[in-house]
Image (tube, rainbow, N blue to C red):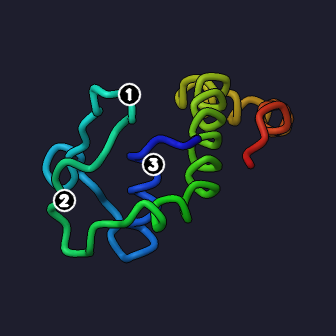
Amino acid sequence: MANLSTKIKMYCEANGVSNVDFMKDVMLQDDSDGNGAYIKEWNLSISQPTDAQLSAHETAADTEEANNVVRSTRRTAYGDIGEQLDEIYKDIDSWKARIKSIKDANPKS
C-alpha cells in the first residue's frame, strides 16, 4: 500500500499541480488511534481529494514508490559521475555494458 504523500503527489500531478510542499501546501498528520495518516491542512488551488480519489491513484503510487527504490539502487551502482565520464573516455563500450547490466539487474515497473 502506497504512502498517503505519494498518492497525494499522483493526484496533484493528474490535476495539473507538479510540485507539492508538504510543509506549506499540504500538511499530514498521523492519527494516534491507529487509523494512519490523514490530511490535516490543504492549501492548494485544486480541491482536496476524497478517499476514493486517492484510492484511484493507489496502483500508480505503488509503482512510483517501487521505481524510486530502483532509481536509488541504480544511482549507487552507477557510481560517481566524474568516474563515469573517465570510464566513458577510456572505453565507452565497457561503460555501456556495465550500465546495461545495472539496469537489467534493477528493472523499473
Q: Of tags 3 and 1, which is closer to the observer?
A: 1
Report, in whole angstroms, how far the alpha carbon at label 3 lies from the one at label 2.
15 Å
**Mark 1 closeness class: few <14, some 14–19, many ≥20 residues within 10 Å:** few
* Rendered-image quadrant of the N terminus: top right
Which residue is under mark 3? 6
Report, in whole angstroms, how far the alpha carbon at label 3 lies from the one at label 1.
20 Å
Determine which quarter of the picture holds residue 75. Answer: top right
Q: Of tags 1 and 2, which is closer to the observer?
A: 1
**Residue type pointed to by label 2:** Trp
| Label 1 or label 2, whichever comes before in sequence order | 1
| Label 3 or label 1, whichever comes before in sequence order | 3
Label 2 SS: strand
* Percent coordinates x, y for residue 29 in the rendering: 24, 37
Q: Are marks 1 and 2 in contact (CB under 8 Å)?
A: no
Q: Is residue 63 left or right of residue 44?
A: right
* Placement of 15 over or under 61, stated as above or below: below
Q: Residue at x 77, y 34 (%)?
A: 106
Q: Residue at x 54, y 24 (%)?
A: 80
* Percent coordinates x, y for residue 36 in the rendering: 38, 35
**Residue type pointed to by label 1:** Gly
Q: Of tags 3 and 2, which is closer to the observer?
A: 2
Report, in whole angstroms, how far the alpha carbon at label 1 lies from the one at label 2.
22 Å
* Percent coordinates x, y for residue 58 in the rendering: 57, 55
Q: Residue at x 45, y 72 (%)?
A: 14
Q: Which mark is residue 42?
A: 2
* Percent coordinates x, y for residue 93 in the rendering: 85, 38
Label 3 SS: helix
Which residue is under mark 1? 34
**Residue type pointed to by label 3:** Thr
